[in-house]
Amino acid sequence: MIKILIDSASDIEQEEAQTLGVALLPMEVRFGEQTYLDGVTLSHRQFFEKLIESDEFPKTSQINEYRWGEAFQTLTANGDQVIAITISSKLSGTYACAVNAAKRFAGRVFVVDSLNAATGERILCDYALRLISDSSDAAAVVTELNEKKKKIQIIAVVDTLKYLRKGGRISGVAAFAGEMLSVKPVVSVVGGEVKLVGKAMGSKRSNNLLMQLVQKCGGIDFTMPYGLVYSGLNDEFLKKYLRDSEVLWKGHIDDPDRIPVYLIGSTIGTHVGPNAVGVAFFSA
């Protein structure tokens, strides 16, 4: 049997992981002296409540080799194989720790660098679940994941770049530019790193720019997993994006309410802050 293990940077919470049939290894997030497990002891909604109310800027920690090793030991105890999917190696040392831990489980544990995060990582997990339902060859599944992950796109409009700047994910100059004149920055994960790919005045123009960038990537492959993602305590901006980007879905999805929607968790929410809206997909 092949089991999927994924870190919580995928924005999968523990309850959902159980429903999906995957094992979840949570990142740690700290507010001052208090430490929480992302998606386990701190829900995504609770995180944004704390982020908005707290004077403390949260800090996240990578999953160390010891914790990966413990998880691998448990999941392979019955002779099963494990495919571990991690946040981009260029955003965290989590992947390197997983690879080091996997060396003790040769032939039983395989580690895939998603080169992504949030829903971009999550849809790779969704595709992995699809693959293992039809295959008992873990190595072949990993080969397919490593090939298809090159087509994953995640593009998001963020309310401000200040959280990315505080978290060291984007330069201070870019953050300053994004905070001027109500500019709405558009960011993407490019080559495993967060990049500023555009900016526009106001939410409508930024939503239009986001839609243009999706089309520029070749559009959405609706035969593959995809999803919308938002951050914060309400989905007001997400609903507006759906209205503004109707052309993306028309002819592919009869009911926009059927589009998968996910709330960003603390690992990524720490860096994007509230009121972000994005789309993750495999390009056509």
Image (spheres, rainbow, N blue to C red):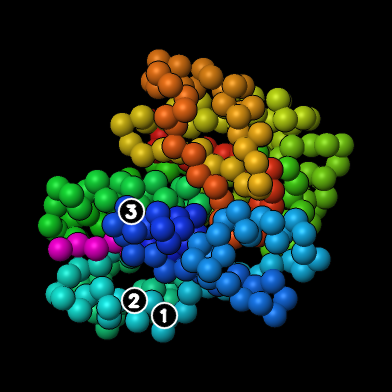
For the N terminus, which image quadrant? bottom left
**Bounds of the magenta segment:** 1-5
Disc 1 versus disc 2: distance between alpha carbons? Answer: 6 Å
Res. 274 mark: none
Q: What residue type is labelled 3?
A: Thr
Residue located at (25% from left, 67% from top):
82
Q: What residue type is labelled 2?
A: Ala
Q: Main secondary structure of the magenta part?
A: strand
Q: Name the residue under label 1.
A: 67
For the C terminus, which image quadrant? top left
Q: Mark 3 points at which residue?
A: 19
Q: Residues within 10 Å of mark 3 (few under 14, many from 20)?
A: few
Residue located at (43% from left, 73% from top):
96
Q: Which amino acid does label 1 sit on?
A: Arg
In the picture, measured across the screen, residue 250 lies left or right of residue 61, that is left
Residue located at (25% from left, 57% from top):
142
Q: Which of marks 3 and 1 is nearer the N terminus?
A: 3
Q: Mark 2 points at which residue?
A: 71
**Residue at the extreme top of the image, as rendered:** 251
When the figure is inspected, residue 130 is found, relative to residue 141, above or below; the finding is: above
- Report the mark closest to the observer, 2 or 3: 3
Name the one closer to the observer, 252 or 234: 234
Q: Position of residue 86 (x, y in %)?
A: 42, 63
Disc 3 versus disc 1: distance between alpha carbons? Answer: 23 Å
**Quarter occupied by residue 139:** bottom left
Q: Do the residues labelled 3 and 1 touch (CB within 8 Å)?
A: no
Q: Are marks 1 and 2 in contact (CB under 8 Å)?
A: yes
Label 1 sits on a secondary structure element that is helix
Q: Position of residue 48 (x, y in %)?
A: 66, 55
Q: Where is residue 92 in the image (x, y as percent from the top left)?
A: 53, 67
Q: How crowded is mark 2: few (under 14 residues within 10 Å), some or many (20 or more)?
A: some
